Every structure is written in structure tokens, then in C-alpha cells.
Amino acid sequence: MNDKLLVTVAPCIPPYLAAGIPGLDLSPQGIANEVVDAYNSGANVVHLHVWDAYGKPTMETHVFEQTIALIRAQCDIIIEGSTGGISELSPAERSVSLGTDIELASLNAGSVNYDQGVYINSPQDIEYWAKEMHRRKIKPDISIFEAGMIFNSLELIEQGWIDPPFIYGFVLGQHGALPATAKNVLFLQELVPPHSVWSVVGHGGNDLTMSVLSMNMGGHVRAGFEDNPYYRPGEFAKSNAQLIERLVRIARELGREVASPAEVRQMLRMPARAKPA
């Protein structure tokens, strides 16, 4: 089972990109529909941001909880909440998703140059998020933009705030951080603890290339409008499901069977959940 593939859909398109795509439905029902369609195409995990009814970041969770309820009513996809956000927010404000019905949460393990700015995740904030996830029994998905962040995560592991198996997402291709290259994937993969579950998130138009590379190396994949809304250069994807369908098709050609959500929970040692009626 450990060779089965985790396929994450990330449907929450950044507002500056959404403005250029007409007809997007970013309401709770619209996001839920995208997630359920992606699930039916093979996604077993969804990465969600806390948004309002218009697809804008917020610290109010009632709309986010509505989106989760709509998803839960139709499928048993694993829901991951984001703790990313504007650096000026407090760690508590950036982690309001931890108070909702999620099973995984992103854990940014360090600060990084991000385009023309700096994405700040201080040691104190990282420790706060790791402790909160541990207290709430939410499994961290550790986001790695630079190699040093892996060593930051090892300190959290040593202190008992993150339980095995450890989940890592190598975020490559972001302007100002590690480029999306095979050499960097190999480098990072060799640094994480043995038997870790890792995936590659390709930014800057590198999502497909990095996903295929990850599949071939035993890693896992992610796709969606958050990472790249284009199916190919100059052509917007029709849906998040279209991006997931492509990855699942390639995985099958490569001999990687896609895990069911129940199998993913078993692989990650997470509690089982009842399927919707």
C-alpha cells in the first residue's frame, strides 16, 4: 500500500489570478463542487484556504465550515487546512482553520523570499502551529521552500510535536526560493527522515513536470488552480478536475495506483472516517 499515490487538489486560486479568469464560482458551493469533481477524478486530499463567500482571505471560519460541510456531505476526501497567509497576521489568526473539521494542516517550516517580498514564519510561530496541531490531533503537512526548513522540522520532531509518518511538501519554482529541478528534488528527498511521505508542489508553471518526476521517484503529487490554473501555456484549465484527471492518467501509465482516502488515512496513521451516506 505504501507505493499508492496521494493526489492532492488545491482549488483556492489566489485572488490576483482569479481576477483574470471570468466565470469562476468561488462561493462555498462553487469550491465544494470543484472539490467533489476532483475527488471523482481521483483526488484523495484537498488543500483549502479560509476564504469568505467571494474567494477572499478571511479570519472568519463560518464560510469555510460551510464549504467543508458541503464537501463532507458528498465525499470522504481528506481535508487539509492552510495556516499560510499574510505575514503581518498573528500565528493564531493564521491558523483559524485548526478550529474546524480538518484532518491535515499545512505547516510552513521557515521564512523565505517570496517574489518581491518575504514570507515570514518565525521559529516562535512555527512552534506555536506545531503545538496546536499536536494538541488538536491534526497531522502537519510540512511545507519546504528551502533545505534549511527540513532541519527546522527535525527539531519539532525531536521535541515530540510531530508524530510519524512525517509528511513533507517540497514547494519548488517559487520566485526567490529553490528552483523546480530534478537535482533539488533529489537533494530534499535525501534530507527528510526515512519512511517520510513526500510530494512536490511545482510553482511557476512547473506543476506537471514536477509531478511526473515525483511519481517516478516514489513521491506524491498536487495540482489545482492555486498552483497553476493553466492546462498548458496560454490555455486555462476547464476545472481543477481536469488537472487531476491528467495526473491520474499519467500515474496509471507509470504503474502507480492511486490510493483511496481510506487507504491514505491508513498510510498516514490517521483515524478512519465514515463515508457519507
Image (cartoon, rainbow, N blue to C red):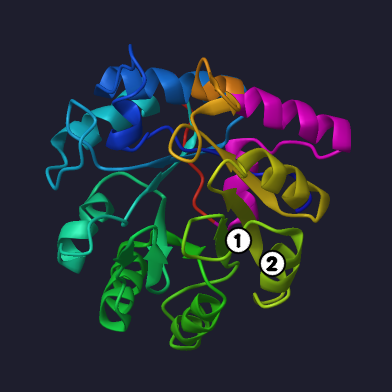
Indicate the position of residue 79 as horizontal and vertical percent values: 42, 41
The amino acid type found where label 2 is placed reads: Asn
- What residue is shown at x 25% (from left), y 42% (from top)? 50
- Estimate how packed mark 1 is, as few (under 14), some (14 to 19) or many (20 or more) residues with alpha carbons within 10 Å: many
Say if 129 sits above or below 213 in the image.
Answer: below
In this rendered view, identify the residue nearer to me: 73 or 235: 235
Q: What residue span does the magenta drawing correspond to?
A: 243-269
Dot 1 or dot 2: first in sequence order is 1
- What residue is shown at x 39% (from left), y 57% (from top)? 115
Give left or right: position of 216 versus 180: right
Give left or right: position of 42 versus 12: right
Is 263 magenta? The answer is yes
Indicate the position of residue 243 as horizontal and vertical percent values: 60, 26
Indicate the position of residue 184 as horizontal and vertical percent values: 69, 67
Q: Quadrant of the C terminus?
A: top left
| Rendered image: mark on residue 184 | 2
Say if 73 sits above or below 207 in the image.
Answer: above
Quarter of image, res 206: top right
Q: CA distance from mark 1 to mark 2?
A: 7 Å
Say if 172 sits above or below 231 in the image.
Answer: below
- What residue is shown at x 72% (from left), y 54% (from top)? 219
Question: What is the secondary structure assignment of the residue under circle 2?
Answer: helix
In this rendered view, identify the residue nearer to me: 21 or 51: 21
Q: Main secondary structure of the magenta part?
A: helix
Q: Write down the residue under mark 1.
A: 179
The amino acid type found where label 1 is placed reads: Pro
